[in-house]
Amino acid sequence: MSEGFEMQDLYGYTLGVVGGNPSITTSVKRSGSAALNLTETTSLGYSFTAVSEAYFRFAIYTSLLSATDFIWRSSTTTLGKLRLNTTGLFELLTGTSTSVAVGTLPLTTNTWYLIELHIKIADAPNGVLEIKIDGIDDASFTGDTKPGAETTIGNIYFLSNTASGTPIVYIDDCGMNDTAGGVDDSWLGDGRIIIIKPNADTATLQLTPSAAVEHYTLVDEVPADGDTTYVEGSVDDEEDIYDLTACGLTDVIITRIWTEARAKDTAVSGKSVALITLASGGAEVSGGDVVLGGTYTTKVLGTEQLVNPVDSAAWEVADIDALQGGPRTRP
């Protein structure tokens, strides 16, 4: 999971479990164009394939200390929490309320911090909870992190929840690694997520535009504008490919890219869409087929690519600046 809220919507997440709905801000962000905004008694949740061990990363900026929990659960059962207390220190809890460790690095208000958390669900002595702040070890616990019978984490929540004051909490640059597969299986480290939008048509334009203009201008809105502008197709395996805006990056390590879109099936017939990338000198790389519903609330993701498929080497800025991409209709 990688999320910088750059699409400026919250499709694909569980909203407002405690109270009001979270929102997107473009005025306070750590990187890119946007961040998540949580106000008092507001939460945002994300579900994933259940795992017993995982690493998480997020950046946080808060106007009030003791305002935010990061909660991990199995279904609806809380297995633990990372809580910011009134002294600006992070506290690790198992279950809903058992404190097992308190950090020593105090946060201050209205400042961005990068938080990393390692969770391993197990009975004592094998359970592990560890937190880093801006890459520095802060608090840790080894022991029983399995307060009940549940052995895996299946969802997480950010919760802005305080009895006094009205906190404003911003979240950005989120990520998750599990421990499977031999890659992306440990601490994430620093990371920033930006969006690169279409900025020109290519010769491959097989979809029908909603207006007689360049196709890319109909799909470059953030947030997506629904039925106001769009491209569409009724024949399987037709596609549009667009040039993308230069990324503007320097002196960076690019660890991954992915494509993302919002789309719907106007006939609600179970049709799908796939997202394509095309690196310079290579062949098209297609993401998996994503079945669409009748609204634009489907979060369509392409294949996450850790290296340039042309040379199997790390992505370079020049590679990104030459990258193309677009949608393909699927059965």
Image (cartoon, grey):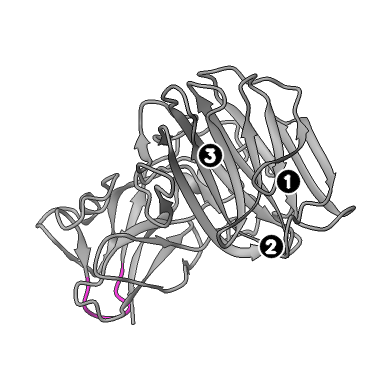
Residue 241: percent from the left, percent from the top? 33, 61
- Please tell me which residue lies in front, 219 or 11: 11
User: Is 22 left, or right, of 163 in this rendering?
Assistant: left
Of mark 3 and mark 2, the one earlier in the sequence is 2
Residue range corresponding to the magenta coloring: 233-239
- Queried whether the magenta region covers residue 236, the answer comes back as yes
Question: Where the N terminus falls, by quadrant?
Answer: bottom right
The local crowd at label 1, few if under 14, some if 14 to 19, many if 20 or more residues have their Cα within 10 Å, is many
Task: Quickly name the residue at label 3.
Answer: 173
Of mark 1 and mark 3, the one earlier in the sequence is 1
Q: Nearer the viewer, mark 2 or mark 1?
A: 2
**In the image, is residue 175 above or below residue 151?**
above
Task: Quickly name the residue at label 2.
Answer: 152
Q: Nearer the viewer, mark 3 or mark 2?
A: 2
Residue 210: percent from the left, percent from the top? 13, 60
Task: Quickly name the residue at label 1.
Answer: 118
Residue 273: percent from the left, percent from the top? 35, 71
